[in-house]
Image (cartoon, rainbow, N blue to C red):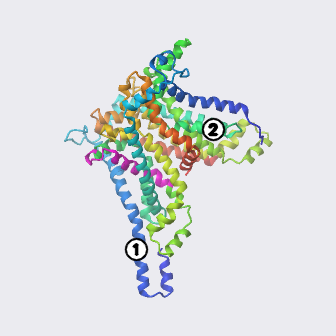
């Protein structure tokens, strides 16, 4: 806008008109500020402020209810590393997130390649595979809960398959498998669609050229397809890792964090400990550490995967 | 390339899709049976369709009240999100050469990396202190928390729109507001659709935010109601599954009709 000013003056417009244009400019500028102002205030009030408050409380001993609290310095942070429940929740969450991200990406890519080949009813199947993405995670969890507690044990007894006869959600060592299956079932929907749209960007001439060169399907995948869709692999890895680190709804619906604490994720622990366990300050410290961990992982993943993309 | 149908892959894809359909078939099958039929076999095709499970579920969970709550929250979130976030993004996108607006852009977008649990505990205290522990507060939080992602999507799109159109409108004496609402906003329709679909899916299916924010059980949304009634359903699985299906149905029906649109919108949002 400002660059226009000299031009107007050069045209020798009367001072009255010039000042009018200037005023108009001003209000034009003002409008931009007014457009963002309410959003900035609300965002600061309901996002930044509570986040800072969370950090503040992490240095106190507030239980969330009482009127008084004291500063305790780094005590909460030191206790975090000694707390078995907290350590277990980190172990569970990481084991879960890594396996989930790997499984989701392998399955999604395989299905997407299938959907991208010459099959009958491609649009129909595409719609079917995406369906889980529009369903409530919590309700899907309830449905699978019944499947694991009732259907599988019944089938196990009927066909005399020993390991199916007990409900895996009730066994501390195996309950996470049930949650992992539900998570993967639902998370694949989104990733399949992304990979599919990635595969559609690969020009078919590349395949023709590589098959003329005598490449088999396997080589074709690693030498042609995968390098071309590497950016999609990056997005999907980062997104699915982030989502699986946040796992919450499925656990509430299926195990409530049990048996014992065997399926308590970090989010669930912050929720239960912070709201009903009287650990408001302690879990705030946990949330701060969790935030730092998620940041580091996201940045690390982006760096590594982008470097790979470049190398390809 | 070969133009023949690849039958082995078609068969594999069909088998895979059965894994997607199976839990839903199971849910429908259980919701239509009575307890005796369920005890005999959960997975067999329901022969006598017990629609009364659905009427019982509607009464037991006060379904229409929860449906109304979910619909009100989703629709208001959708409308406010599209109107406000696109406008903020416009102001930022057209002033990216300015330090202040560039900083604002990174301020909003960096929130993508901040996990919700760090906000969760304090924001509950805050909303209840402000009397916002109700649907209005929930709508406000959805609009605010959606900004990080939406501004990222909108700014990328708006920067690809040539500025000549706006300049013509300015010469005609249009104010900045006028330029946005009359010239830019109509051009945003495709990306509004994307943001709208993502926002709808999130607000409709979200469980955690209603769980911690809503204090009055009369305000409960559909997923929250399923959680609250879980203990009351007890072992009356037919009632529980009828209730689950009723809660899933609106979004599934919408998806069946607008399936291409929904998938296209979601893809566009992710690739940005």
Q: Who is closer to the viewer here, A151 or A244?
A: A151
Q: Who is closer to the viewer here, A67 or A167?
A: A167
Region rendered in magenta: B128-153
Q: Position of residue A157 (x, y in %)?
A: 52, 12
The subunit letter for the residue under badge 1 reads A
- Same chain shared by disc 1 and disc 2: yes
Q: Which image quadrant is residue B105 in?
A: bottom left
Q: Residue at x 42, y 30 (%)?
A: B55
Please name the residue that numbered disc 1 is placed on: A26
Please name the residue that numbered disc 2 is placed on: A124
**Left or right position of A96 against B132:** right
Q: Describe the element under mark 2 as helix, strand or loop.
A: helix
Q: Measured along the vertical axis of the image, is residue A76 above or below residue A8?
A: above
Q: Residue at x 43, y 44 (%)?
A: B203
Q: Position of residue A309 (x, y in %)?
A: 61, 47
The subunit letter for the residue under badge 2 reads A
Disc 1 to disc 2, C-alpha distance: 55 Å
1 vs 2, front mark: 2
**Does residue A25 appear in the picture of this structure?**
yes
Q: Main secondary structure of the magenta part?
A: helix
Q: Position of residue A194 (x, y in %)?
A: 58, 43
């Amino acid at each position: 806008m400002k660059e226009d000013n000299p031009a107007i003056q050069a045209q020798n417009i009367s001072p009255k008109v010039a000042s009018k244009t200037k005023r108009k400019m001003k209000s034009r500028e003002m409008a931009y500020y007014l457009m963002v102002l309410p959003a900035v205030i609300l965002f600061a009030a309901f996002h930044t402020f509570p986040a800072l408050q969370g950090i503040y409380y992490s240095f106190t001993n507030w239980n969330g209810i009482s009127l008084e609290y004291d500063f305790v310095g780094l005590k909460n942070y030191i206790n975090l590393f000694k707390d078995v429940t907290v350590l277990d929740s980190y172990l569970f969450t990481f084991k879960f997130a890594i396996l989930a991200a790997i499984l989701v990406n392998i399955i999604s890519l395989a299905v997407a390649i299938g959907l991208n080949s010459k099959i009958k009813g491609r649009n129909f199947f595409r719609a079917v595979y995406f369906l889980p993405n529009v369903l409530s995670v919590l309700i899907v969890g309830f449905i699978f809960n019944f499947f694991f507690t009732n259907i599988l044990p019944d089938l196990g007894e009927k066909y005399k398959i020993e390991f199916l006869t007990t409900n895996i959600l009730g066994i501390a060592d195996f309950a996470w498998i049930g949650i992992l299956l539900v998570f993967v079932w639902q998370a694949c929907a989104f990733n399949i669609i992304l990979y599919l749209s990635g595969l559609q960007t690969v020009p078919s001439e590349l395949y023709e050229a590589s098959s003329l060169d005598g490449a088999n399907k396997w080589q074709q995948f690693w030498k042609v397809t995968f390098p071309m869709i590497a950016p999609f692999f990056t997005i999907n890895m980062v997104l699915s890792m982030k989502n699986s680190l946040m796992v919450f709804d499925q656990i509430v619906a299926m195990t409530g964090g049990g048996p014992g604490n065997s399926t308590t994720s970090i989010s669930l622990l912050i929720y239960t400990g912070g709201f009903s366990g009287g650990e408001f300050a302690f879990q705030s410290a946990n949330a701060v550490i969790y935030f730092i961990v998620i940041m580091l992982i996201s940045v690390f993943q982006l760096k590594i995967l982008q470097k790979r993309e470049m190398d390809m | 390339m070969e133009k023949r149908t690849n039958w082995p892959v078609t068969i594999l894809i069909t088998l895979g899709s059965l894994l997607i359909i199976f839990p839903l078939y199971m849910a429908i099958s259980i919701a239509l049976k009575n307890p005796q039929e369920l005890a005999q076999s959960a997975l067999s095709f329901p022969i006598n369709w017990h629609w009364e499970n659905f009427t019982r579920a509607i009464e037991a969970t006060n379904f229409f009240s929860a449906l109304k709550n979910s619909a009100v929250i989703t629709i208001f979130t959708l409308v406010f999100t599209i109107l406000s976030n696109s406008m903020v993004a416009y102001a930022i996108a057209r002033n990216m050469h300015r330090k202040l607006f560039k900083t604002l852009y990174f301020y909003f977008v960096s929130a993508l990396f901040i996990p919700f649990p760090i906000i969760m505990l304090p924001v509950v205290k805050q909303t209840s202190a402000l009397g916002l522990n109700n649907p209005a507060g929930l709508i406000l939080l959805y609009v605010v928390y959606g900004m990080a992602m939406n501004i990222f999507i909108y700014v990328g799109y708006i920067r690809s729109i040539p500025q000549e159109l706006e300049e013509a409108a300015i010469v005609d004496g249009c104010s900045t507001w006028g330029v946005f609402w009359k010239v830019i906003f109509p051009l945003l329709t495709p990306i509004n659709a994307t943001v709208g679909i993502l926002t709808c899916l999130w607000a409709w299916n979200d469980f955690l935010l209603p769980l911690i924010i809503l204090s009055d059980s009369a305000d409960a949304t559909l997923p929250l109601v399923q959680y609250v009634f879980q203990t009351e359903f007890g072992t009356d699985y037919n009632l529980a599954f009828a209730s689950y299906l009723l809660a899933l149905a609106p979004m599934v029906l919408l998806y069946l009709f607008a399936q291409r649109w929904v998938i296209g919108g979601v893809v566009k949002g992710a690739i940005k």
